[in-house]
């Protein structure tokens, strides 16, 4: 029976890579390129790169159009990044110094992530036009449950961290061990497994698009494609 | 059937660019596009929105779509004016107008052709080299008649008679549509007032073919190459286009095709330059409170926001107020992207909304430098029985510089010289 969760973990892992490769092979279906864009006169590379960075790290476009939503969205994405960095300590041995330094931010990010999701959900529900799609509900709900179970473990139902580390290291080294016997850990981990195959793909591709779009708008050919 | 679906999916995927295939996977389905889409308030189906179209396109190219998705995508793609508002508000900046045009082309190559009225328009352009189905030798009649009517300071020369520093590109609408010929006449007169030496291609002026691109016709690039070659052979240096659609075609769609030695500017930019240089001086007062409607092809698509506003501000007596949505957030009047042909009902509702917005801004009139927007807004104004004045930007300058040739005067004068015997329908 103990093997079943391990099989599920590897199936999810495989599903993630299958999905990633399907997307990538989809990109390869076309070799078509748009004609080169006219370079904007007087464009300097640094301001254009700075503009791309602002789009990417500050969500400038969303800030310009919807400041209320921006607050939640930016807080969520930034917190998500720190939460991932925080969790890397369970998957690396030895844990690099930089990951140790990020730990306090990661803990704070856990709270920000969970409450920003609530905020985003409320903003969207309160919008004049109802524009939440069912996919939004599924992803937002799933992420909120993951965040909540993480916070519950952090504050009330702490699992044995040695067991957690042994379990996660066992998975990535293909020497699986028994999951820790903490209900909230099992729930948290299962929800993450559920999320992985549905992980919104924009987190991988959106940065490319943001950089590419700025390159084109500014007539800059060096942000992504060195010439 | 499964094989057909696979082959269709592959054709559509192959018809998009690699960047666009990445883009359709990058949509986060946040729905910002839906909040700003000018079509959505009038047709609230999900496939109308950029999010819905991208979702269906992604499903089709990933082959997990049923054929109903083809129809829904097709429906959504053609109920869209490709105004680019969704691009402006997209947090990850998916280049939607380019995507819709390329998707239309990809769908057509996979056997899902354009709506019938669009196909008829495309056939007309191919057959007659203009979108009005007229004989090409009628193209420059506006110039001859305007000169004979005393509306111009001197005759307009053809390029072969006298090549100049500037080629004035009037476009099909201002050349053939009697209600919009004043745009060409006023443009020519304004250039003459500023002592700009210019010529026209007359019957050699081709349709810019940008409508082929807008409606997803795969021949666009080939046609653009032919026209670029012709312009290069004529040793054209600067093209001034008074039509926003032609400007977008020549400036943006011909990129990489048109010789980089040829400068393409919209008339508004050119007039702005002439005013800044002091060559064109608005002097008579035009006591009117106006609001400016940004054409998508100039504003969102090519970043021309400030120049037309500067031209309007240079006119004594004229006051400019902005609508609630202006600049990059300006609501589309629905005349772009072939929407008027595919869904005239939607176009009318969109322009009516824009007219109501202009009324709310408290202006006496709406001014736009695009004759197509002007036609669209006129339809909207009549739909809501609005008493707002609707003017081309040229008209405002003309009233301030040479008020003897207003739009109405030109229409009347040209009509008098436009006997039925002169019309030659091809």
Image (cartoon, coloured by chain):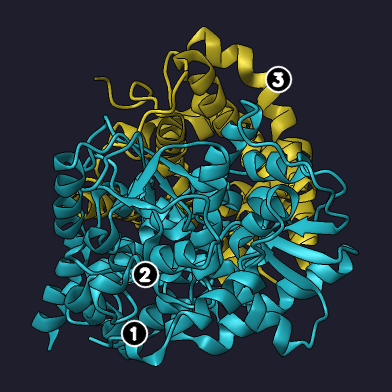
Q: State the hue of chain A.
A: yellow
Label 1 close to label 2 by CB (< 8 Å): yes
Give the SS element for disc 2: helix
Q: Which residue is mark 3?
A: A104
Residue at 52 percent across and 33 percent down: it is A163
Q: State the hue of chain B.
A: cyan
Q: Quadrant of the C terminus of chain B?
A: bottom left
Give the CA distance from mark 3 to mark 2. 77 Å
The image quarter containing residue B366 is bottom right
Q: Residue B255 placed where, x, y %?
A: 29, 42
Q: Which residue is mark 1?
A: B422
Give the CA distance from mark 1 to mark 3. 83 Å
Q: Are marks 1 and 2 on the same chain?
A: yes
Q: Quadrant of the N terminus of chain B?
A: bottom left
Q: Is residue B21 above or below residue A207?
A: below
Q: Is residue B53 above or below residue A162?
A: below
**How would you rate the neighbour count of disc 2 (Cα within 10 Å): few for under 14, some for 14-19, many for 20 or more?**
some
Give the SS element for disc 1: helix
Give the SS element for disc 3: helix
Q: Earlier in the sequence, mark 1 or mark 2?
A: 2
């Amino acid at each position: 029976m103990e093997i079943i969760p391990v099989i599920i973990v590897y199936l999810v892992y495989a599903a993630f890579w299958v999905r990633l490769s399907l997307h990538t092979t989809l990109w390869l279906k076309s070799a078509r390129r748009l004609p080169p864009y006219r370079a904007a006169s007087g464009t300097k590379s640094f301001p254009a790169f700075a503009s791309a960075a602002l789009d990417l790290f500050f969500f400038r476009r969303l800030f310009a159009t919807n400041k209320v939503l921006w607050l939640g969205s930016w807080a969520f994405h930034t917190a998500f990044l720190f939460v991932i960095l925080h969790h890397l300590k369970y998957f690396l041995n030895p844990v690099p110094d930089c990951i140790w330094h990020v730990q306090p931010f990661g803990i704070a990010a856990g709270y920000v992530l969970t409450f920003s999701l609530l905020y985003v959900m409320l903003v969207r529900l309160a919008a004049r036009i109802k524009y939440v799609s069912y996919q939004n509900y599924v992803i937002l709900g799933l992420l909120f449950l993951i965040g909540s179970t993480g916070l519950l473990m952090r504050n009330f139902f702490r699992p044995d961290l040695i067991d957690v580390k042994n379990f996660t290291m066992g998975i990535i080294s293909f020497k699986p061990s028994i999951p820790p016997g903490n209900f909230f850990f099992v729930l948290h981990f299962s929800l993450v497994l559920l999320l992985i195959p549905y992980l919104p793909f924009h987190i991988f591709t959106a940065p490319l698009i943001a950089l590419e779009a700025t390159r084109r708008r500014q007539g800059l050919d060096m942000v992504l494609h060195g010439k | 059937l499964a094989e057909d679906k696979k082959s269709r999916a592959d054709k559509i995927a192959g018809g998009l660019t690699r960047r666009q295939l990445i883009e359709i996977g990058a949509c986060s389905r946040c729905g910002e596009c839906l909040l700003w889409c000018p079509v959505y308030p009038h047709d609230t189906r999900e496939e109308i929105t950029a999010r819905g179209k991208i979702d269906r396109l992604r499903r089709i190219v990933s082959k997990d779509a049923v054929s109903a998705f083809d129809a829904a995508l097709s429906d959504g793609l053609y109920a869209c004016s490709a105004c680019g508002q969704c691009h402006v508000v997209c947090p990850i900046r998916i280049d939607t107008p380019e995507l819709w045009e390329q998707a239309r082309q990809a769908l057509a190559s996979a056997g899902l052709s354009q709506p019938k009225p669009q196909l008829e328009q495309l056939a007309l352009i191919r057959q007659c080299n203009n979108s009005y189905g007229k004989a090409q030798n009628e193209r420059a009649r506006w110039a001859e008649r305007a000169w004979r009517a005393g509306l111009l300071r001197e005759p307009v020369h053809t390029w072969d008679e006298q090549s100049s520093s500037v080629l004035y590109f009037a476009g099909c609408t201002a050349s053939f549509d009697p209600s919009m010929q004043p745009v060409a006449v006023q443009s020519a007169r304004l250039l003459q007032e500023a002592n700009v030496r210019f010529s026209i291609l007359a019957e050699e002026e081709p349709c810019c073919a940008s409508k082929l691109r807008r409606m997803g016709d795969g021949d666009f690039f080939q046609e653009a190459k032919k026209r670029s070659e012709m312009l290069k052979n004529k040793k054209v240096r600067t093209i001034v286009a008074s039509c926003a659609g032609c400007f977008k075609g020549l400036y943006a769609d011909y990129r990489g095709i048109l010789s980089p030695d040829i400068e393409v500017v919209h008339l508004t930019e050119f007039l702005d330059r002439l005013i800044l240089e002091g060559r064109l001086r608005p002097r008579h007062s035009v006591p009117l409170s106006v609001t400016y409607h940004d054409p998508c092809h100039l504003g969102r698509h090519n970043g021309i926001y400030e120049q037309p506003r500067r031209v309007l501000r240079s006119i004594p007596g004229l006051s400019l107020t902005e609508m609630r949505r202006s600049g990059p957030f300006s609501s589309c009047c629905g005349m772009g992207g072939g929407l008027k042909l595919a869904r005239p009902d939607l176009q009318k509702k969109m322009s009516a909304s824009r007219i109501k917005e202009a009324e709310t801004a408290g202006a006496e009139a709406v001014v736009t430098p695009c004759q197509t927007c002007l036609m669209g807004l006129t339809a909207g104004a009549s739909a809501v029985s609005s008493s707002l004045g609707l003017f081309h930007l040229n008209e405002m300058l003309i009233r301030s510089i040479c008020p003897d040739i207003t739009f109405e005067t030109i229409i009347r004068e040209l009509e008098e010289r436009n006997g039925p015997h002169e019309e030659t329908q091809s």
